[in-house]
Amino acid sequence: MSLDARYVVKPVRKALQLLDVLASEGRPLTLSELAERAALPKTTAFRYLYTLRSGGLVAQAEGSDAYAVGHRLAAIPAPEAAIEALKQAALPEMQRLQLRFNETVNLAIVDGDEVVYLAMVGSTRSLRMEAAVGARDPVHSTSLGKAILAARPLEHRLDGLPKRLAKRTPRTLASRAALALDLARAAEQGFALDLEENELGAHCVAVSIPGSGPPAALSISGPVQRVPVEALPRLGAALIKAAAAIAAKLG
């Protein structure tokens, strides 16, 4: 059945073209690149992108002129090519982190209110904290999920989360207010923490990967006796450098 062109709102259709370009590329694009690919004047493309940003459909990193698909579209499965590019860019950095600290390094994205593990480089120690590739955990109880949430604009950090947050352990932050405060700390310090919130006996620290499409995070996890609270800022600093290197590889 063909559509009647009289009822198509042209500015909306053109804005959707920008989303189509971002989704098909699977990586952040500059305003110039987007305008060229969508055959739009830069000033028009900017206004459409600004409007899409206001609705969380497009994201722009602080101090960057590159745009990426926003968190409101995170529930839409990312193109396989984008997932594969993310894993290929991340794996060398994950291996370097594992060799340096000999703790488990994880790569994950968000799907709704869960994180999905895409890749993992495990510790060689007999006692280690590991999930399986393809496994899922709640966004609010994991450092991976919290790192991705903290990278969102302030007004959209809790979008998509249930009103009542399930407690995985007695330490899980079960109120949205407590989680919002924790995300504010994560945004300020550059890394998010999971202090036995997802699994008793395990600590985890994570950072978001700037400009990744889909939004992703990198983490280091280990038993509390080997990864005490005082060691987490050092791990966080190493993760920030690794995430920046991954972002550079992704363009």
Image (cartoon, rainbow, N blue to C red):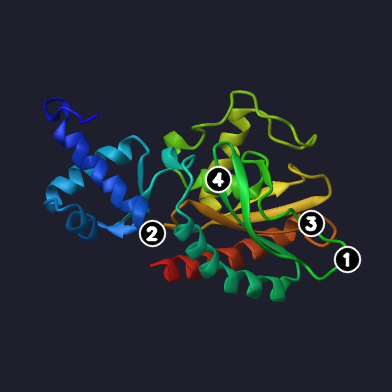
Cα separation between marks 4 and 3: 20 Å
What residue is shown with label 1?
126
Q: CA distance from mark 4 to mark 1?
A: 29 Å
Check disc 4 and report the residue beneath it.
Answer: 110
Going by the numbered disc 1, the residue's amino acid type is: Ser
Earlier residue among tags 4 and 3? 4
Q: Which residue is mark 3?
A: 129
Asked if residue 234 shows in the view, the reply is yes
Q: Quadrant of the C terminus?
A: bottom left
Tag nearer the camera, 4 or 3: 4
Q: CA distance from mark 1 to mark 3?
A: 10 Å
- Asked if residue 127 is positioned above or below residue 174 in the image, the reply reads below
Q: CA distance from mark 2 to mark 1?
A: 38 Å
| Relative to 173, 74 lies left or right | left
* Secondary structure state at the residue bearing disc 3: loop
Q: Is residue 153 left or right of residue 11?
A: right
Q: Is residue 95 left or right of residue 226?
A: left
> For the residues carrying marks 2 and 1, which lies nearer the camera in this image?
2
How far apart are labels 4 and 2 at the CA level? 16 Å
Image height of 108 relative to 249, above or below = above
Q: What is the quadrant of the N terminus in the image?
A: top left
